[in-house]
Amino acid sequence: MKLPGNKYWKVKMRLFKNSTVGFFLLMGVLAFLFLLDLLSGSVHISLYQSISTLFHPSSSDPQIAAILFQFRIPKAITAVLAGAALSVAGLQMQTIFRNPVAGPDILGISSGASLGVALFVLSAGWIFGGTPLFSIAGSWSIVMAAWFGAGCMMFLVVMLASRLRDLMTVLILGILISGAVMAVVSVLQYFSNESTLKSFIVWTMGSLGSTTRDQLWVLVPSVAVGLLVALFSAKFLDAFLLGENYAKSMGMNLRLAYLLTFASTSILAGSITAFCGPIGFVGIIVPHLARKLFHSPLHSKLIPATMLMGAIVMVIGDLISQLPGYATTLPINSVTSLLGIPVVVWIIFQHKKIGAI
Amino acid sequence: MQEDIYIRCKGVSIGYRERSTASTVVKKDISLHALSGEMVALIGGNGIGKSTLLKTIAGFIPPLSGELLVRNRPVSDFSATELAREMSFVSTEIVRVANLTVHEMVGLGRFPYTNWFGQLNDNDQMIIDRAILQTGLSGYENRPINRISDGERQRAMIARALAQDTRIMVLDEPTAFLDISNKYEIVRILHQLVSEQGKCIIFSTHDLNTSLTMADRIWLMLEDRVVEGIPEEMASAGYFDWLFPNNQHLRFDPERNDFRIKREKYGVVNLTATGQELIWAKKAMERLGFEVKTDPLVSPSPSLPVSQSLSLPVPQSISIDVIQLPQGWNIIHSGIFHNVATLEDLCRSIKKITTRPGS
């Protein structure tokens, strides 16, 4: 049967009709950008040098090996993890709240993670008289404090926002929650002593590059678990697309679905916030880019797509933040905000036309 | 076909539990049932609790008290998946997920049958294709649901419920927001499912006419009680007059299976005509507020008394005769004779007559 307008859809769908091809393409782009990220920085390392160092570390210049293995590779891996984690967290939140501007930073999940860390670092100062911030045990306790804070905030936001499908209400709610959290953090800082305050301030200045190799041993498994949980809840998230009532009527275990997505979002957003500090807007914009490219709202496609594209976007952000030609780097949060805000404005205008996610 | 009781409410109270102690009761003491192979229309005014009742039956909110049986088993006994295999639901809410194709959405209906990752096997694909065919959406499989018409989207929602392969389907106002053609198409599809597959379909509606002509059973929610029965019994028992007790201007017209606005009669018109002329002239005069006497054998008497119950200052007595050559109408009113050619002129003349001077 021939239908009016059918041709148009066929043309549009062809772009990424075969999503496997799309995934391989994205992986190629990511690999290229990852390599580019290793090459860029204040010390010039050539492509040949870096490849030979990667494959024969013992027979190469120890200084270059140190730069690569101690700084650039951990930083690039962190960028990949942060992009994937924040984007998938954002995707899950957009589906659960059925709101195109939901994301870990907008809805205060990242602030919740900060609050968790603040409470832990500053109270550890009172209890232990100091914080073992930079040991492996310290990393685990910080990351768990961040999960806890993010989880509590996620719970609070769901209680408040699950019935608000209006875009603006959710944005206002996010502003209020973030404001409240920042106020609490300031009060905590006011009451804490100098040394704990200092270790907290150092933590808040976190960036992609501040993650050490040891901390990666905490970050990699955390993000892996969060992403796996997200992949395993793809079917639940698909059902959520139609709304809670439809999901229920199709026999979805609502409690299990919420628990899985809560856990995944809190772990993903919490871990990244714990090690890199707040990174805005990636979580909102990447899911939209993935939807645009893959033309599907189904999560079995969208979660891998969002992971790959999140990693790509974050590595690009890292490349830009290094300001090619200058010795200094920009804070990653500023880069993502400058790149992300126009996209968010575009999403808001699109939303008026298209409807929900 | 063996008739089974698919839904039975015994003294059910519906409403929302707010805390462990407090709850808002929407309706008390509801006793209803629905059989296999029955299309049940749930009728009631706005805000009377139709949606709450449907949500209770679909298992979204537990009944506050009483017994709700689905295929002779308490609804609380079912696991979520078991209930989803017995009963599907279509809500009144419009789903506008961007880029979700009709096929993908219908596929979501296989949720209670698929594995953890929601993979569709050949059997699932077959059921999805059948559901799309039954709702007349063949050729629309790859169209995104946010870019099809409201009627097509509603049929896609029904196809999703069909793919869920349940004996019972519950639909909350499936024909709201639709034009007449789409409305009848939806009702036709539902009727076909009931008669061909013996499903039990419960839907709420404000369209009295369709439900009284198509439904096998009416659940009627009134202010003080909920009653059920087959449409004709409900109408003859006069239940529909209680549907809108606060509106004095509405009257249930059993001939039309619908409500009409009560109007005061200006007077009586004696109409002499046959066939199409009779039908349309009668309708026109009734619209203008006249009682029409149409016995063509009785010759019109020029001074028929107006019924006394009406408080009209000027008694009106009008006779209208259809004439063939030239085609038109003769109007006789208090001895004055008019001739008009068209129905529109006829209405204009009658209006002129009945417009009281000075008012």
Image (cartoon, coloured by chain):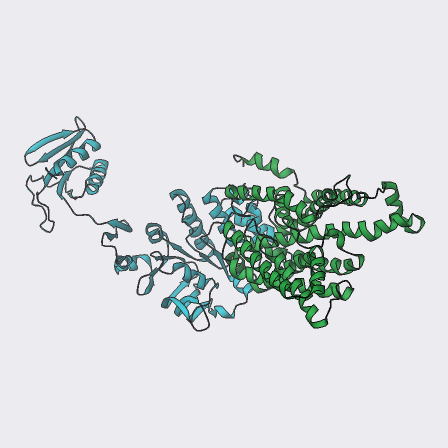
Residue that extends furthest to the front in the rendered view of this protein: A194
Q: Quarter of the image containing the N terminus of chain B? A: bottom left
Q: Does residue B57 appear to the left or right of B237 in the view shown?
A: right
Q: Position of residue B132 (x, y in %)?
A: 53, 47
* Display colour for chain B: cyan
Residue that extends furthest to the bottom in the rendered view of this protein: B21
Where is A3 relative to A129, above or below? Answer: above
Q: Does residue B295 appear to the left or right of A172 in the view shown?
A: left
**Residue A120 or residue B342, whichever sits in front:** A120
Q: Position of residue A39 (x, y in %)?
A: 81, 43
In green, which chain? A
Q: Does residue A41 appear to the left or right of A297 in the view shown?
A: right
Identify which residue is drawn at 46% across, 67% down. Answer: B62
**Residue B332 or residue B241, whichever sits in front:** B241
Q: Position of residue A208 (x, y in %)?
A: 73, 51
**Residue A181 or residue A2, whichever sits in front:** A181
Q: Is residue B109 visible?
A: no
Q: Position of residue A75 (x, y in %)?
A: 77, 51
- Tell me the quarter of the picture where residue A42 sits: top right
Where is A143 relative to B318, above or below? Answer: below
